[in-house]
Amino acid sequence: MINVAVCGAAGRMGQTVCDAVQAADDLSLVGRADPLLDTALVDVLGDADVVVDFTTPDAAVENARTCLEAGVHCVMGTTGADFSALEGVGSANLFVAPNFAIGAVLMMELAQRVAPHMPECEIVELHHDRKLDAPSGTAKRTADLVRAAGGNVHEPIHSVRLPGLVAHQEVVFGGPGQTLTIRHDSTARESFMPGVLLAVRKVASLERSPTVGLEHLL
Ligand code: NAP
């Protein structure tokens, strides 16, 4: 049994993660940290093997550091923060995924495949209107991967924020006389849960910390 605490437990993602952990036979939900619940991360760390963090860009790096220094593994879903300074901190592992949806991981892989053949590329990401960061972590990660594969991602990345949206992205490639569009839509937050639970189960055995990207666990 893996003991899991959720940081940001009263948020949109945090609540969905709590439900998914409670529904899994091999996981036990041992703590919910969130200002709304009047419970801080340090209050729930003692019982946890793994902390899942879906909070805010401002809080996420310190939350991860707190976990690592306490010897508790951390699965980080919060976007818009830079975790590179946490390399080698503490005795536990940090796993970071800009996007836990398998379809989004495949979108990024397909985009890397297209880039050498049709390098000119634009990224349009669309999210609900309460998302704090722009462009999204997924869009920045896609741009890095496409560039590394030989693509020319035009700036700026386009960010749309509207009620009614969840998380969506188009990667559009253009060449003489043709375009190719790869599109992924998360229409519900449940789309992220298989990836989050996979990370919870695998974070203890990572060879590198931080490890960034769900593709490393698949
Ligand atoms: P949200 O609904 O605003 O939830 C965030 C929650 O975290 C809020 O309840 C917030 O409380 C709480 N919080 C803030 N600081 C905290 C701290 N230091 N300790 C404990 N809890 C704290 O946001 P969301 O829509 O769930 O999104 C959360 C993050 O996940 C965002 O960065 C988003 O981009 C990211 N996300 C990632 C993925 C992925 O696949 N990686 C998918 C979807 C979303 P207050 O409201 O009181 O500040």
Image: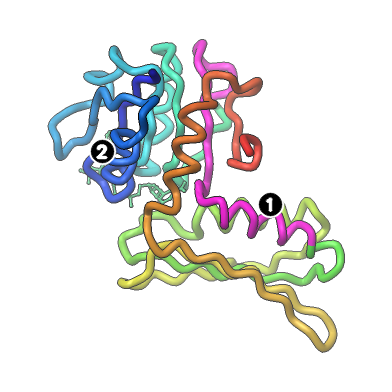
For this view, does 99 lie left or right of residue 23? Answer: right
Residue found at x 71% / y 65%: 153
Amino acid bearing label 2? Ala
Quarter of the rendered structure image containing ligand 1: top left
In the image, residue 143 above or below residue 154: above
Using the image as rendered, state which of residue 218 and residue 129 is in the foreground: 218
Residue that label 2 marks: 9
Using the image as rendered, state which of residue 150 and residue 109 is in the foreground: 109
The percent coordinates of residue 18 (x first, y second) are: 29, 37
Tell me the element at label 2: loop
Tell me the element at label 1: helix
Q: Quadrant of residue 103?
A: bottom right
Point out the tag, 1 or 2, that comes first from the N-terminus: 2
For this view, does 138 lie left or right of residue 189? Answer: right
The percent coordinates of residue 31 (x first, y second) are: 24, 25
The label on residue 165 is none
Residue found at x 54% / y 26%: 202
Q: Are marks 1 and 2 in contact (CB under 8 Å)?
A: no
State yes or no: Cβ of the residue under disc 2 lies below 8 Å from any atom of ligand 1. yes
Using the image as rendered, state which of residue 149 and residue 25 is in the foreground: 25
Identify the image quadrant of the N terminus: top left
Q: Residue furthest front?
A: 25
Residue found at x 42% / y 42%: 78
In the image, residue 215 above or below residue 207: below
Residue that label 1 marks: 144
Q: Which stretch appears magenta?
A: 86-113
Density class for disc 1 (Cα within 10 Å; few <14, some 14-19, many ≥20) is some
